[in-house]
Amino acid sequence: MTKHELHQKDMLITPLIYHGQSPYQILTNHPELDMSVRTLYSYLDDGVLTARNIDLKRKVKFKPRKVHKTQIKDRTVFERRMFTDFQNLGSDSFAEMDTVHSSQKSKRVILTFFLTREKLFLAFIMNRCTQGAVKLIFDELEHQLGTYDFLKLFNVILTDRDAEFGNPEALENGSCGIVRSSIYFCDPTRSGQKGGIEQAHTMLLMVLPKKTSFEFLTQWDLRTIVDHINSTPRESLGGRTPYDVVLEHYGIGILKALQLRPIPPDEVNLTPKLIRFNR
């Protein structure tokens, strides 16, 4: 490769690395670069490009925010909702659910969902981490999607044992009395049983580092972050994005109802600058 050719590749690759994009993402969106992921990592390791190995955001190990979470105390809640009950379903398409807390004094919390088959990530701001706040999000989602489409996406949900999920019947039953979901719980201290959403949180924390306060975070901010995460190609999806797969499986109507939009590949930004640019 000539110096000129390497310079041309560097001019394309380095700005995308600075936007938090991974080598896999860059090469998937730019096959004209004609190199393997391993080669690009070697270039970064060897200092051949302007960007360096340290600029790869996904190589940073994010530690979860150290926030005490109150656990469900009523053990009867788990009857027929244990992780073994979930496994007995044999479902290969379900949603994982969790909350992300601010490390600051803000009481605001992010409720998150991850559709395991499509790798779609959703996030909603809540002013308080309560059962009522979670139910409100469920009701709003059912209103936006309609009960039929809500059932498509959230028919089965796997979550942990945090107190905000302590009234599963309220979440499972819709406004018209229709059972809209079935909720199951991971085993105690086994968050890895819902590993998909834990990985999605890693991408979220690239934009919202653990010192970020959620006090002034808006739903518009979260929707912007979600759009960029869902416009990132996944190797597990054959290089497609979660947005593309949802479009294929469900059509544009669900994406519009969720107010999701695709981001052009070279505009995807998974750094804290994303929110600053959109305020």
Image: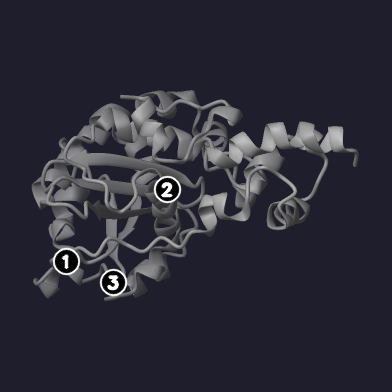
Q: Name the mark nearer the viewer: 3 or 1.
A: 1
Give whichever of discs 2 and 1 has the lower sequence position: 1
In percent of width and height, residue 108 lies at 15, 45
In this rendered view, identify the residue nearer to me: 234 or 101: 101
- Is any part of residue 29 visible from this angle? no
Quarter of the rendering containing residue 54: bottom right
Indicate which disc residue 68 carries.
1
Q: Is residue 241 left or right of residue 180?
A: right
Residue type marked 1: His
Residue type marked 2: Met
Q: Residue at x 43, y 24 (%)?
A: 253
Q: Is residue 141 left or right of residue 13?
A: left
In this rendered view, identify the residue nearer to me: 95 or 223: 223
Asked if residue 124 is positioned above or below residue 183 in the image, the reply reads: above
Q: Are marks 3 and 2 in contact (CB under 8 Å)?
A: no
- The residue tagged 2 is 206
CA neighbours of label 2 inside 10 A, class few (<14), some (14 to 19), many (20+): some
In percent of width and height, residue 188 lies at 27, 76
Residue type marked 3: Met
- The residue tagged 3 is 82
